[in-house]
Image (cartoon, grey):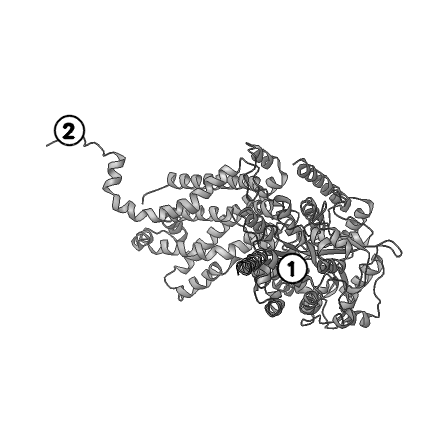
Amino acid sequence: MMADRSVARPPKPALWARMFQERTAYLFLAPILLVYTAFSLYPIVQTFELSFFDAKIVEQGPFVGLKNYRDILASTSFHQALGNTLVFTAGSTVVVLVVSLALAVLVNISWVRGKTLFKVIYFLPVVTSLVAVGYIWKWMMDPSYGILNVALSLVGIHPGPNWLSNPSLALWSLVLVNIWKWVGYFLIIFTANLQAIDQSYYEAASIDGAGAWSQFYRITLPLLRMAIILSVILGIVNFLKAFALVFVMTQGGPAGRTELMATYVYREAFGTGQMRFGFSAAASMVLFVMIMIFTALANRFGKAGEVAL
Amino acid sequence: MKRRWASIIVLAIITLAVVGAAPGWAGGPKGKVVIWYDSGAAWSSFIADFNKDLAAKYPDITAEWVTQDTAQLSAKLVTAFAAKLGPDIAMGSQYRLVAPEQQFKAWADLSGKLASDPEFKEIVAGLPKVHVDAYYSGTKLWGAPQVVQSAALFVRKSWMEKLKAKVPEDWDELTALAGRFTNEDPDGNGQKDTIGYCIFGAPGVTNSAGIQFLYSGAAAGMLHPIVDPDGKPSFNTEIGREVAKAFHRWQHEKKVTSPATPTFTHKEFYEVVQAGKCGIGRVGAWNVGPWAKTAIAEDYVVIPYPPMKKGQKSYQVSWSNAIAMNGSSKAEEAAYVVFKALMSKTGQTNFYQKLTSAARTDLDWATLATKPQLAYFTKPQSYALEMAWIDTWLPVLDILSKHLNGLLADAEVDPVKALEAADKEAQVKFNEIRKK
C-alpha cells in the first residue's frame, strides 16, 4: 500500500517542551555550562565591552567608541604583529600537519616494531613546559655556544646562522621550535584515525593494482578528512594565540620581526606601565574574530569536500 | 568622707580617660604589617633575620612578607589599592611604585615625619639627597630609596694580565681591549669562545638595548639619556647618535659583542658572565656576592664606564629601589615602626651584609665593603639618574629599545636613521601621553 501523503506529520514540540523532556541531560550539563559562562563567555563579553573604553587596570575610563579600533588599524606595530602571526600560524600549521601525518603513516606500518615507544618519544615535547622548551632552544640556537651551530661547524658550515637575531630568520626559527613542540600531538590524532580505517579497503585496492601512493591518496587521505579538518582548526586556534615561545626566546625582536598578536596585546597592557587595557581589549577582539573566521572557513572547506567511498 | 569618695572618682575618671586616649601606652604599636616585595627567595635570609630582630624588639608587631612577581608588581599594587586592600609597606623598583601614587595617592606623606620625628630625620640625612629628591611629588615625600644602585663595568683581571693590557679609559681603548678579549684566547683554553664586551640588546624595558644606551649615553656625557625632566624624549642628540654608531661598530664592524646580543636580556647576560666567558660587562654591587660562587668568581676589577673621549664629562647611571608606606594603613603605627627598622643603620647594615646593597651612605663601609669590588661602589661618582618616576620613561625606553634592537640585529640599519625613527615614534607617544 502506498504511503498516504495526506497524513500530516506530528507537529514538532516547542523548544521549551523539548528542553523539559530532556531536562535530566540539561541538569547534568548545567554545572559545566555555568563554569564555561563564568570563565569563558563572560570574559569575552566583558573584553568586548572594554574595547570601547579608554580603560585602565581598575577603572573603565571614558567611552571612546571605535577609537581603540581605529588606533589599532593605524598602528604599524599592530600590522607587523598581524603579519607575523599569520606567517607563524600558516607555516606552523601546514608543516606540523604534513610532518605529523607522514610520521603517523610511518608509525602505522604493520611491520614497524616499537610503535608505542615512537609515540611516547614524539609526544614528550608536547608534555614539556613551553617555557622550558623556549629557554633550552634559545641556548641551542645561540650562534656562539649553541649545539645547532656546533653541529653545523662539524660539516663545514661556519659561522652558523644567527637563528634568533637575524631578522629574516628569527620568525622561522620560532616556527621550527613550534613544530618540534606540537608534532607529537597531531601524530596521536592521526594515528588513532589511521587505526580506525578498515583494512579491507587497502586489500581491495591492492588486488586492483593500486600502489602505496595511490592507496594513500585515494583511500587514506579522504578517510582522514575529518581528522585533518579538526587538526587544522586546532592548529590555527592554538598557533594564532601563541605567546610563551616568543616571550621567552625573542621578546618580539629583532625589531619586532617576531612580535605576535598575543605578545603585542601583552606589551600594550603591561609592558610599558601605561596599562592600556581598552586598547589591548580591542586588539584581543581582533584576534578573537580572526580565530572565529579561520575556524569557520576550515569547517566549511572540510564539509564541502566530504566524499563517500 | 564624701570629699574622699569624690576625689577617688575624679582620679578614676582621669586615669580611664588617659588610658583610653592613649592605647599605645598599653604596650606600644601592635599588629600585623603586610610587606609586598618583588625579590623572591633572594631575600629569604635577610627576612628571617629581620623578623627575628623585630620580634625581639617589638613582640606585638609581626611582619608578613609577601613576594610578588616583579613584572606584575605595579599592576597588582594598583588593583590592590583600587580595592582598598593595599599592603602596609611596599618595596620594589621605584617606577613600579609610581603608578599607585599617580592613580590613588596611595602612599603616606612622609614629609610631616621629617619635621616631627628626629629618628626619621636621621634616616633621611643618611640617604643620598639626589635620590631622596626623586621621591617628592610637589611637597609630598611619598617614599624613600631603600636601595641605591649604580652601574659600573667589570674587566677581567686575569685576562688583562695574560694580554698585558690595562683598564680602558675611553671608548677606543674599550673597543680595542674588547677585540683582544674576543680574538686572543684570554682564558687560555685554546678555543675562540670568549666575548669581549657583553651588552644587553633585547627589546623591552628592563635590561634591554635601551638600558644599554642609558649606560653608554650617560658615560658619553648625556645627563638625560632617555627623557628630560619634563618627560620629553632626549636621546636623539649629537652624542646620542655617536652612541648608536658605537653600538653598530661594536656589533657589526669590530664584532666585539656576542652575535646573540639582540636576544640578550639580563638572563642570557648573567649566564654568559657567570660561565666566565665575558671580558667586559655591566656589574653592580648586588652581583658581587652571587658571582663569587661562579666561574667568574672575583677575577675582575670594577671601573666606571669610561667617557667616549678622555677628559670629557661622564656620568654613571644610578637608580633606587623604593620603600613606601600605605597612606591608609590600618596598622599605621606598627607599619611606621617596621619602616624605620628597615631603614635604620642596623636594618640597612643587615641588608647589605646579606645582599651587598643599601641606600644609606653612613654605614660602616670599612667593615662592610672589604672586597675591592664592593669598595668601588662606596665611592661617590657623578650620577645620571634613571628617571623612572616620570610617566613617559617606560614608553620612550620601550620604543628606543625596539629600534636599537633592530640596529644590533641588522648590519644594514643606519644607526643615525634608527635613532631618528625612534625619536619620531617617541615624540608621537610623548604627545599622546601628555594629551591625557
Near mark 2 (Cα within 10 A), the count class, few <14, some 14-19 or many ≥20, is: few
Q: Is residue B89 visible?
A: yes
Instruction: Give how far across and how far down residue B220 sits, in percent.
Output: 82, 53
Instruction: Give how far across and how far down residue A56 sits, in percent.
Output: 57, 42
Look at the numbered discs 2 and 1 and tell me whether their residues touch, using CB distance below 8 Å: no
Q: Is residue A272 visible?
A: no
Instruction: Answer left or right for A207 relative to B199.
Output: left
The quadrant holding residue A277 is: top right
Q: Residue furthest right?
A: B311
**Residue A50's mark?**
none
Question: Could you tell me the amino acid type at mark 2?
Answer: Val
Number of the front mark, 2 or 1 = 1
Which of the pair B395/B243 is nearer the observer? B395
Q: Residue at x 43, y 56 (%)?
A: A187
Which of the pair B375/B137 is nearer the observer? B137
Q: Residue furthest front?
A: B1
Instruction: Answer left or right for B364 relative to B69.
Output: right
Instruction: Give how far across and how far down residue B143 sits, in percent.
Output: 68, 53
Measured along the vertical axis of the image, is residue A288 above or below residue B214?
above
Question: What residue is disc 2 on?
Answer: A7
Q: CA distance from mark 2 to mark 1?
A: 89 Å
Q: Residue at x 88, y 57 (%)?
A: B310
The quadrant holding residue A190 is: bottom left
Near mark 1 (Cα within 10 A), the count class, few <14, some 14-19 or many ≥20, is: many
Q: Chain of mark 1?
A: B
Q: Residue at x 83, y 54 (%)?
A: B314
Question: What residue is disc 1 on?
Answer: B339
Which of the pair A300/B332 is nearer the observer? B332
